[in-house]
């Protein structure tokens, strides 16, 4: 017996992923999202897998990856391990290093602010 897969409207997909409806339409138009199924009335019917791709796009975007760079990665067979594609593995390792450096920078900034607040210091050393 075949079960019916739950689908989501564009409004629901937007709410669940944090992407705007315009961004979702744009990502579909430029080929970042796989072709989205349509209901009989022509409305988009997003599957759970589509929402996962949107989450991947959001994550990659936050690493600083451009939409153009993402195109080669969002079409990678999602069930395959990242390690099975040497180029993808290297790219993700580079982005991981970039994020690690950004985190370290943010921790230094946070420490600076905390020191100023804790000691009620002026912003500049006198």
Image: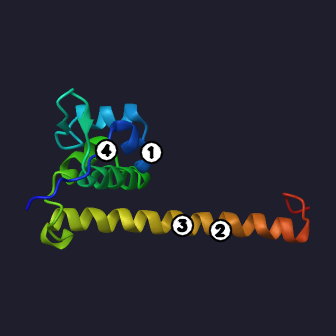
Q: Position of residue 64 (x, y in %)?
A: 41, 51
Which is closer to the viewer, label 3 or label 2? Answer: 3
Question: Alpha-carbon distance for marks 3 and 4?
Answer: 35 Å
- The quarter of the rendered structure image containing the N terminus is bottom left
Among numbered discs 3 and 4, the one appearing first in the sequence: 4
Question: Alpha-carbon distance for marks 1 and 4?
Answer: 10 Å
Question: Alpha-carbon distance for marks 3 and 2?
Answer: 9 Å
Contact flag, marks 1 and 3 (Cβ < 8 Å): no
Question: How has the structure been colored for display?
Answer: rainbow
Among numbered discs 1 and 4, the one appearing first in the sequence: 4
Among numbered discs 3 and 2, the one appearing first in the sequence: 3
Which is closer to the viewer, label 1 or label 4? Answer: 4
- The quarter of the rendered structure image containing the C terminus is bottom right
| Left or right for 126, reference 103 | right
Among numbered discs 2 and 4, the one appearing first in the sequence: 4
User: Relative to 102, is 21 above or below?
Assistant: above
């Amino acid at each position: 017996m075949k079960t019916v897969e739950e689908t989501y409207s564009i409004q629901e997909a937007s709410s669940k992923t944090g992407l705007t409806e315009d961004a979702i339409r744009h990502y579909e138009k430029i080929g970042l999202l796989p072709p989205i199924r349509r209901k009989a009335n022509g409305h988009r019917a997003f599957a759970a897998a589509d929402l996962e791709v949107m989450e991947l796009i959001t994550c990659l975007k936050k690493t600083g990856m451009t939409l153009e760079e993402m195109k080669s990665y969002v079409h990678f067979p999602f069930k395959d391990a990242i390690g099975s594609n040497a180029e993808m593995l290297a790219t993700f390792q580079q982005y991981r290093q970039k994020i690690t450096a950004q985190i370290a920078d943010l921790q230094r900034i946070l420490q600076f602010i905390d020191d100023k607040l804790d000691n009620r210091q002026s912003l500049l050393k006198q």
